[in-house]
Amino acid sequence: MQVTSTTSISGNYWQWQGHSIYYVKAGQDQGDKPPLLLVHGFGASTDHWRKNITQLQQKFQVWAIDLLGFGRSHKPNLQYSGSLWRDQLHDFITEVIGQPVVLAGNSLGGYASLCVAAQKAESAVGLILINSAGPFSDSEQKVQKNSLQKLIGNITRSVLLQPWASYLLFQYVRRKSIIRKTLKQVYLDHSAITDRLVEDIYRPSCDPGAPQVFASVFKSPQGEKIDVLLQQMQCPLLLLWGEGDPWMNTREKGGKFRQYYPNLVEYYLQAGHCPHDEIPEQVNNLIESWVVSVSD
């Protein structure tokens, strides 16, 4: 059964380093349970958590935030990186929420949340990663074994570093038909791909600065490796994997997480890259029971 919400949760803006950051807040402070902070993936926004907020706010105080460069947040021409978003999330937790949280991040948002939990430990009492992005140290070595692959990758990257090339690619991938086609690749249940979802992803791409944010992805230095971050982290960890994700081998990646952080809980789900949106009720129930168990 799909959990859906047709009403948008109205949000607010917070000023961070001279930039407007959009966020939403729902539910009451529970006292005995920490707040949840939901962090979206690349190209998404707080809208992508609508189905989760609807259910989770009944048991928790829930916050969701648009990372700088995405959603309704400002899109300045900066060098974007995991450390930039780590600092944004840490400052938001400190200045706005006012107490440590359980971070839940999907894809890029998972990597940014991991950076907080590892390097700003005072902000995180727990971490939930949903098909999280980010490389392990040995995954880079594997890619470098294939010299032809590496050469093609370097040529592609150097072309995309050209402003005209990244702009043309941006104009192509932001088309609604292409957004829908991409979603069909990464969602197992195509009934979850609604016109509203496509619009939620398309709308921020019309904002001033959006092409530059897209281009910056190809220029950004690679962040700290996951294994290094896990060695710095101490809080409880829940991994949720949509097994139908075409962008990653979830079983292999889950195995690497266990290698470096054996004291974790994980579930493999029949979904694609965004299980929180595709099978929200299942994901919400797993989040709820896990947070309660680590809060006792």
Image (tube, rainbow, N blue to C red):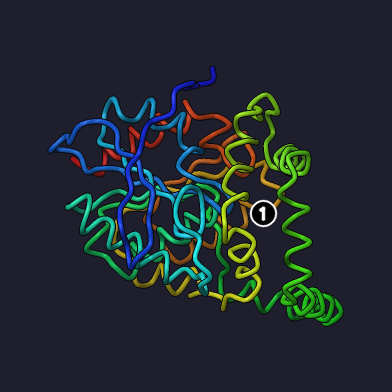
In the picture provided, is 54 more to the left or to the right than 185? left
**Residue at 32% of width from left, 62% of height from top?**
16
Query: Between 231 and 90, which is closer to the camera in this rendering?
Result: 90
Q: Residues within 10 Å of mark 1 (few under 14, many from 20)?
A: few
Q: Quadrant of residue 90?
A: bottom left
Where does the image place residue 255, in percent across and percent down from the top left?
A: 55, 58
Q: Residue furthest right?
A: 148
The x and y percentages for residue 142 are 71, 75
Q: Which is nearer the eye, 248 or 110?
A: 110
Q: Is residue 245 left or right of residue 204?
A: right
As drawn, the residue found furthest toward the front would be 208
Q: Is residue 180 left or right of residue 61?
A: right
Q: Secondary structure at mark 1?
A: loop
Residue position for label 1: 249
- Image quarter of residue 7: top left
Whether residue 27 is situated above or below residue 164 in the rendered picture:
above
Q: Position of residue 6 (x, y in %)?
A: 49, 21
Q: Position of residue 264 (x, y in %)?
A: 39, 52
